[in-house]
Image: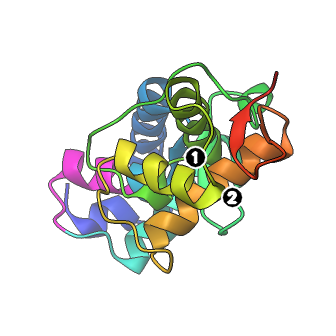
């Protein structure tokens, strides 16, 4: 499929096919960022680059399909399987793949922070954020980097939701 067919207004057949494709992506990868959904659709359609026109069309497809969306603290939007999944921290997280740390939902980053804290008892928030970034393949996450900021958002989410606490020594630990 070319860009013109992908973005053609009023093409219900194409719109329905792309909505079904988004449904399949969400079923496998949810929660998933809209940027990742756009990349997956472009890959499937043989389109080399995600342009602003493509991003607008993906946004329209998501609204048309009435997918459950939520925005992260950084403003990035994620699609969930259902509204009850928003804010739910699972026991596992997915490593690897072609996702940027900003494309990983805060709930998944929090799950990584919890798992790391189970193994490495107590560390300062900054160190934990660096470990979370490293768990997703970002070995050198400077404090000013986007990767570090995203990882720190996951640590803060775990702290705010009482999955983790800060002890009297200033170290992040599991809730006793």
Residue 130 horizontal/vertical position (percent): 46, 56
Q: Which residue is mark 2?
A: 72
Kindly report the secondary structure that dominates the magenta region of the rendered protein: helix
Question: Is residue 11 among the parts visible in the rendering?
Answer: no
Q: Are there few (<14), some (14-19), or many (20+) residues within 10 Å of tag 1?
A: many
Residue 112 horizontal/vertical position (percent): 52, 35
Residue 34 horizontal/vertical position (percent): 50, 55
Viewer-closest of 167 and 118: 167
Q: Which residues are magenta?
A: 38-48
At x 58%, y 32%, the residue is 117
Q: Earlier in the sequence, mark 2 or mark 1?
A: 2
- Residue 6, compared with residue 88, is above or below; it is below
Q: Is residue 50 left or right of residue 43?
A: right
Q: Are marks 2 and 1 in contact (CB under 8 Å)?
A: yes
Viewer-closest of 54 and 157: 157
Q: Is residue 72 left or right of residue 95?
A: right
Q: Is residue 6 left or right of residue 101?
A: left
Viewer-closest of 74 and 175: 175
Residue 151 horizontal/vertical position (percent): 54, 56
């Amino acid at each position: 499929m070319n860009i013109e067919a992908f973005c053609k207004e009023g093409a219900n057949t194409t719109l329905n096919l792309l909505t079904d494709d988004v449904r399949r992506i969400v079923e496998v990868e949810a929660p998933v960022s809209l940027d990742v959904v756009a990349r997956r659709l472009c890959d499937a359609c043989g389109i080399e680059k995600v342009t602003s026109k493509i991003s607008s069309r993906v946004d329209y497809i998501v609204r048309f399909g009435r997918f459950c969306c939520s925005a992260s603290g950084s403003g990035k939007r994620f699609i969930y399987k259902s509204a009850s999944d928003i804010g739910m921290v699972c026991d596992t997280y997915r490593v690897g793949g072609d996702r940027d740390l900003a494309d990983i939902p805060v709930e998944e980053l929090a799950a990584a922070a919890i798992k790391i804290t189970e193994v490495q008892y107590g560390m300062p928030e900054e160190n934990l954020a660096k470990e979370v970034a490293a768990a997703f393949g970002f070995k050198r996450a400077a404090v000013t980097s986007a990767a570090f900021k995203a990882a720190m958002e996951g640590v803060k989410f775990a702290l705010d939701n009482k999955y983790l606490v800060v002890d009297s020594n200033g170290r992040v630990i599991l809730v006793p």
